[in-house]
Amino acid sequence: MRNLYRPLLAAALVTVFAATSCTKAPQDENRGLRPEAVVLLAYANTSPISSADILCSGVVAAGLIITARHCVRDGQRLRVVADPVDLCDQTPDMGTPLTSPWQIPNPRADIAVARATLPGSPRPPTAAGAPGTFVVTGWGTRPGHPIRCTSRTITLKPASGCGDDDTTLCLTGAQENTCTGDSGAGVLDHTGELIAIVTAGNSCHAGAPGTYTRLGPLMTWARHHGLATS
C-alpha cells in the first residue's frame, strides 16, 4: 500500500480522505473477474528473492497480472512469483521475468495490467466467508515484523474515514490489516469474485481504514479488448 506504506511515492500519490459512509456494495460494472493466482512482484535483478526485495503484490485474472499503478511507475524490470511459495526456502531462479509492457486501463485509476503466463500450478485465492466481508491475500508485512516468508490472507470489513464512492472502497481489517507490500493485492467478496485492489492506507494496525480501488476502469478496458470477464 502507498502513503505510509510506500513513503517514496506518497508525495506524488496522496489519497484525499473524506468522511463519507463506507457501506456501499461494489457496483455491477466492477464485477466479473475470477482470480486465478496470487503473485508477488520483485525486482528482476535480485536473486535469490528475499522479503526485503518484495515491491508489491498482485493477482492474476483473465490472463492478466493486475496490480496497483503506483507499483510500476519507476520502470524497473520485475519478476513475478506465484503463490504458494516460501521465500525462506527457495531457489535462485525463482519466478518469471515480466517481459510484457504494463498497460494503464485508466490514467485516473490506480490499476496496471500486463499479460503473462505463469508456470507450475498457482494456488487461487480463497473467497470471503460471509456476505458483507472481503478477503485479500498479499505479501504485506505486519507491524514490527518486516520478514515475510509466505503470503497472508486478511479478512476485511467496511470502514469509515476514507473515500468510498464509485471508484474506491473504504475497508479495514479487524484482526490484522494490510501493510507494506500489499499494494496491488486483489480483494475478493464472498462469491470469489475480484472486486478491488489494495491502494493506500495510513496505518498498518487493525481498525485503521484503507483505500481500495474498484475495478470498474479495468472492466471497461477488458470488455473493449475482448477479454473474458466471467
Image (cartoon, grey):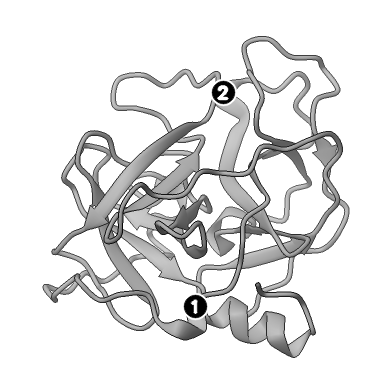
Residue at point 46% right, 56% down?
188
Which of labels 2 and 1 is toward the front?
1
Instruction: Say what amino acid the circle numbered 2 marks.
Output: Ser
Report x, y in % for residue 1.
Answer: 42, 49
Residue at point 42% right, 38% down?
180
Report x, y in % for residue 187.
Answer: 45, 56
Asked which secondary structure carries label 2, the reply is helix
Residue that label 1 marks? 30
Instruction: Say what amino acid the circle numbered 1 marks.
Output: Asn
Asked which secondary structure carries label 1, the reply is helix
Report x, y in % for residue 158.
Answer: 22, 60
Residue that label 2 marks? 51
Q: Residues within 10 Å of mark 1 (few under 14, many from 20)?
A: many
Which of these two is toward me, 190 or 220?
Answer: 190
Apparent side of residue 201 relative to residue 22 in the rendered image (left or right) = right
Q: Is residue 108 visible?
A: no
Q: Is residue 165 above or below residue 43?
A: below
Which of these two is toward me, 15 or 92?
Answer: 92
Report x, y in % for residue 63.
Answer: 78, 61
Residue at point 14% right, 64% down?
161
Q: Earlier in the sequence, mark 2 or mark 1?
A: 1
Q: Residues within 10 Å of mark 2 (few under 14, many from 20)?
A: some
